[in-house]
Every structure is written in C-alpha cells, then in structure tokens.
Image (cartoon, rainbow, N blue to C red):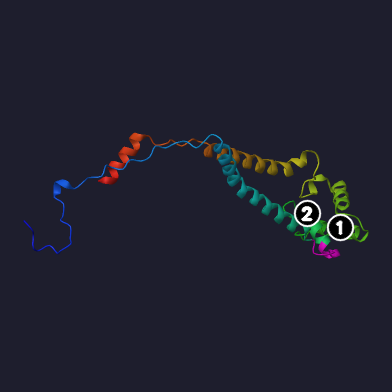
Amino acid sequence: MNDSSQPAGASPEPAPAEVATAPPATAPPVTAPPATAQPAARGRRRWRVWLPWAALVVVLVGALVIGAGRGGGKESVDHRVQRIASEVRCPTCRGLSAAESDAKTAEAVREEIGTRVQQGQSDGQIRAALADRYGADILLRPQGSGVAALVWALPVVAVVLALAGLTMAFRRWSSVTRAKPSDEDRVLVDRALRR
C-alpha cells in the first residue's frame, strides 16, 4: 500500500529493524617508535632542558662582566681616601669603620691614607701598611690569601654545590619513567566517558 503523504521521488524510510548499528570504535594499538628514533628524541629533550640554563648562565656572566667593567673614569683623591677608609676598622671604636667614626684615631687613619694616596701608593700597599701598624684585624675585608681566603671561597663553593645538587635533582625527576596506560585502563576511561 502506497502512502500518499510521502512526496514523489522520496525513498521510503527503513524499518527500525533494518537500522544497522556500527561496531564500537576501538583505539588502535599503541606501538613503540622504532629504536633508532629514541636517541634523537632524547637528544632533543636534553637540549630543551639545558637551553634555559645555558641562557641564564650567559645572562649572569654578561651582567657580571658589564658590572665589573664600569670604572667610571679616574677616581678623585677624596673619594679614594673615603673608599679605603671604609674598608678599614677604627682602631679605638671597633664597631665602626675609619670613614664612619669621629674619633681622633680614625681621623689619624684617614690622614695617613690621604698622605699615602698622595704619594702614589696602591690600595693594597696602603692596606698592608695599615695592617702592619695597627694589626691585621684592622681590615674589614679579609685578605685574599691563607685562611682568610676561605671567607671568599666558601660562598662560591656553596653556590656551586647548590646548583650541582639542583641539577642532579632535576635530572633525576625528569628521568622517572611514566607509567603507560594498559588496555584495561583505556577500557575504564572509555566506560567513564560514555556515562
């Protein structure tokens, strides 16, 4: 029997029993990349890890070089006397430098520094002469030799060791193998997504 409500040329709708159901889509099996591709991927990953660290080192070294290179021209005599006096302890008031103290002995130290600067002595010669006269503890900054060198070397060694420890920790954390999902895990995820 023809249905007159259907326009001419239209195909009849299939019966519900005739509707074909598509089989559920399954994920393709995961295959490992060829063994030759893994070393190249590791090399790229290492490069990506070390590139920011290398950039940081370049920036720090550049900043140190620029900062150390700024001399600002020749230093005036008064400024040099003030700078050297700030590196020397006042002989009578141990809590202040010779530049900060108003004591007579600090004034005498500043005058001696000024005289030696006028004579053309270097900063090291002036500090050595003051240490000979008043004792080595007059220097606020320790000398760069002997046991006093530890004061300068220990912070650098501590920073280097800290950076080495952080590098080893980051390398260990990045080398931890991540668990790959099994087929059972994928099935559980598919079931959860269908709900």
Q: Give the quarter of the image for residue 189.
A: top left
Q: Position of residue 126 (x, y in %)?
A: 87, 53
Say which residue appears at 68% left-offset and 44% top-offset. Answer: 155
* Mark nearer the N terminus (2 vs 1): 2
Q: Give the quarter of the image for residue 10.
A: bottom left
Determine if the magenta segment contains residue 75.
yes
> In the picture provided, is 28 more to the left or to the right than 11?
right
Residue 178's label in the rendered image is: none
Residue type pointed to by label 2: Glu
Q: Position of residue 36 (x, y in %)?
A: 56, 36
Say which residue appears at 36% left-offset and 41% top-offset. Answer: 27
Depth order, front residue of 158/188: 188
User: Considering the image in quadrants, where does the N terminus appear?
Assistant: bottom left
Q: Position of residue 2 (x, y in %)?
A: 8, 58
User: For the residue labelled by badge 1, is the local secondary structure a helix, a strand or a loop?
Assistant: helix
Determine if the magenta segment contains residue 16.
no
Compute the Cα span from label 2 to label 1. Answer: 11 Å
Residue type pointed to by label 1: Ile
Depth order, front residue of 53/152: 53
The residue that disc 1 covers is 113
| Main SS of residues in magenta | loop
Say which residue appears at 38% left-offset and 34% top-offset. Answer: 182
User: For the residue labelled by badge 2, is the local secondary structure a helix, a strand or a loop?
Assistant: loop
The residue that disc 2 covers is 87
Classify 81 as above or below 132: below
Please provide the residue range marked out in magenta: 71-79
